[in-house]
Amino acid sequence: MATLDVIRRGTPDPPHDLWPRLRARLDAQDDVVRLRVPALGWGGVAALAAAAATLFIVPDPLAFLATSGIL
Amino acid sequence: MPIPAEPSDETLLDAWRAGDPAAFEALFRRWQAPLRRHLTRMLDDPAAADDLTVETFLRLHRHRERWRPGMPLRPWLFTIARNLARNRLRAQRLWGWLPLSAVHDRPAPPPRSDETQRRVAAAFAALPPAQREACSLRLLADLPVDEIARVTRVPAGTVKSRLFHGLRRLRAQLADLKPEE
């Protein structure tokens, strides 16, 4: 317990209060518009994987996209 | 006359989420000192500890919708602080590798005038990081072992072992300091 007393005495709480600083940061945040990108679901992951796989599997991806009407 | 019980952290969080801003301030005032003490020991830099204490509550504010009833606040709060501290230490190590660090653009921590403060800071700094973290959470933030285990993501037995060895080292380092002066 003596060590604990020494440790607590050796780690004093700073005299200043941080609440005004936090309040100011929160007020500043209110002026910022945050854009949230929707989470990618399984469908999105599967579509991206299919697109990426197509690029590697198809010998000429640009021609493939053009002939399939995407480009 | 019975003394009214202090509302729990979770009650305050619930009240805040329901639209009571005073509950958030009460939470901050309750936890700013333990968080600062813990972060000061983890970073060995009181100014950085202040920054991260504020940042921890900003993150809590931003992600408050993730809290679910029954989820204890304290481990969540200290986990946020832990992640922020780790990111900062990682960034400091990265800066240390760069030649720009020779410019000394980061201010050094203020010198500690008090001998006890200096010795306690040195004793914690000499501990292995895992023991320092466990001892700081237990002794300076008053977290119980099971919550330390949740924050640090190790079994409770590992926390107890870290506390045992860390406390033994701290006692050895600080044995000559008197508890009351």
Image: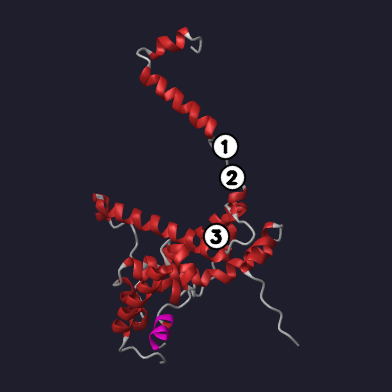
Gap between marks 2 and 3 measured at Cα? 17 Å
Magenta part of the chain: A2-8
Q: Given the image, on which type of amino acid does mark 2 rest?
A: Val
Q: Residue at x 40, y 81 (%)?
A: A7
Name the residue beneath numbered marker 1.
Answer: A38
Name the residue beneath numbered marker 3.
Answer: B57
Q: Chain of mark 3?
A: B
Q: Residue at x 51, y 72 (%)?
A: B33
Residue mark closest to the camera, 3 vs 1: 1
Magenta-span inclusion, residue A5: yes
Q: Which is nearer the N-term, disc 1 or disc 2? A: 2
Q: Given the image, on which type of amino acid does mark 1 rest?
A: Pro
Q: Chain of mark 2?
A: A
Q: Assign the magenta stretch its main secondary structure.
A: helix
Residue under disc 1 on the same chain as residue under disc 2: yes
Q: Given the image, on which type of amino acid does mark 3 rest?
A: Phe
Kindly state the secondary structure of the residue where label 3 is placed: helix
Gap between marks 1 and 2 measured at Cα? 19 Å
